[in-house]
Image (cartoon, rainbow, N blue to C red):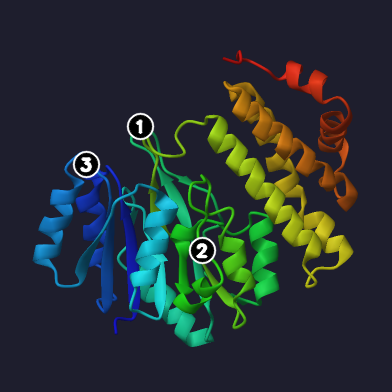
Amino acid sequence: MPAVSVVVPVHNVAPYLEKTVCSIQEQELADIEIILVENLSSDGSVQICETLAASDPRIRIIRLDRAGLSLARNSGIAAASAEYVCCIDGDDTIESDMLSDMYGALVKYGADIAVCNYVLDYTDRPPVYRYAETGQTRHYTSDGMLAEMFQEHISNSACVMLVRKSLFGNVSFPEGRYFEDHATTYRLVAEAARGCVHIGHSYYHYLQRPGSICDRLDFRKAADFAEAALERLAFIHAHEGFSRKEKKLLMQNDIKIYVLYMIEAISHVRTQEEKSRLEKLKDEGNVILTYGAAKGRRKDRLLRMKYLWKLFYRQHRKGQLQ
C-alpha cells in the first residue's frame, strides 16, 4: 500500500488542475497515490485527468454522476488504499516537502492527524499568511488541538490535514452544504485518540480567484456557515474534556460567526423558503443564550434575534422577497 492517498476533487478547474497535480507528483514522499475525483466537469477537466493518469501510474480517476465537493471528498476517501489520506483542492498547490514532513511527524509521534498552515495566494497582491510561521512541530492531545482550532490559532481547513483514514469511519463531509470543513474537521480531531501534531509552516497554497466557492457569499453559503457554527457550539457545550470556564472561552469565535452570518443571510434572502430556513436557524440559535458565554454586543444581538426578530430582520434586510 502507498503511505499516503491524496484525494483531489475535480469540477471545472481546467486552468489550474495540471499545476495542482504536478505539485503533488513532485512530492519528496513519492510513495503516494493520487485519486482524481471527477464530478461533472464541462470545461475540459476530464481530458486533463485522463492525460495525467496516462503519464503516472500513481494516478487513478473516479468518475461521479453528481457534482459536489463533499461528495467528491467522501468518495475519494472511501476508495483510498493508504493508511493516511489528505484532500487537496483542484486549483491549489502544495510545497514539495509537505507530505514528507507531515507523514514524518505522524510516524515520529504516533499521532492520528497532522496539521500545517496555509497561505492565501493572490494574482494581484502579495500573499497573506494567516497563522504564525514558527516552523516548529508540536504534539497535542485531541482536546488540546480542539482548543487551538476553536480559537482559530490553528486552521480548521481539511486541506491542511493528513488524517488516519480509519477516523473517517465515524465522520464524513456533509453533502450539499458549503463550509463543510467547519462542520467536519473538529469531529475528526475529536476521534484522534493518539493525538495530533501541528507544523507551523505554510506548505499549502490556497489560490484566491474569482468564481471559487468562497469568492462570493449568497444566502445558502451564509446559512450553512451559521448552521456549522451552531453545531460546533453544541459540541463544545457537551464536550466533557473542557471545563466550564474553557467552554465559555472556546465558544467566542463560533458565537461571532453565528451572529455575523445570520445577519449576512438576512441580507441575501430572496424566497419564502429561504426566510423559513433562516427563522428555523434563529430558533435553534436561542440555545446559545443558555450557554452563558455570549457577552457584549453579540449577546445584545442574540437577545434581539430572540425577542425582537421582526424588527431585527427589517433592520438588516437589503432585498425583497419574490
- Seen in the image, is 162 located left or right of residue 80? right
Is 249 rendered above or below residue 222?
Answer: below
State which tag comes first along the sequence, 2 or 3. Answer: 3
Q: Return the residue at label 2.
A: 172
Q: Which residue is pictured at 87% across the width and 45% down the height?
A: 289
Residue 210 location (% of width, % of height): 37, 32
Nearer the viewer's eye, disc 1 or disc 3? 3
Residue 55 location (% of width, % of height): 9, 65
Mark 2 touching mark 3, by CB under 8 A? Answer: no
Occupied quadrant, residue 263:
top right
Q: Report the amino acid beneath label 1.
A: Asp
Residue 227 location (% of width, % of height): 65, 45
Q: Which residue is pictured at 80% across the width and 60% down the height?
A: 237
Q: Return the residue at label 1.
A: 124
- Seen in the image, is 47 located left or right of residue 198? left
Residue 137 visible in image: no
Q: Which residue is pictured at 48% across the width and 80% down the height?
A: 106
Secondary structure of the residue carrying numbered label 3: helix
Residue nearer the viewer, 15 or 82: 82
- Seen in the image, is 252 located left or right of residue 58? right
Q: Return the residue at label 3.
A: 15
Mark 1, residues whose alpha carbon is within 10 Å: few (<14), some, or many (≥20)?
A: few
Q: Report the amino acid beneath label 2.
A: Ser
Residue 116 location (% of width, % of height): 49, 64
Point out the image quarter for the C terminus: top right
Q: Report the amino acid beneath label 3.
A: Pro
Secondary structure of the residue carrying numbered label 2: loop
Q: CA distance from mark 1 to mark 3?
A: 17 Å
Occupied quadrant, residue 81:
bottom left
Residue nearer the viewer, 42 or 3: 42
Secondary structure of the residue carrying numbered label 1: loop
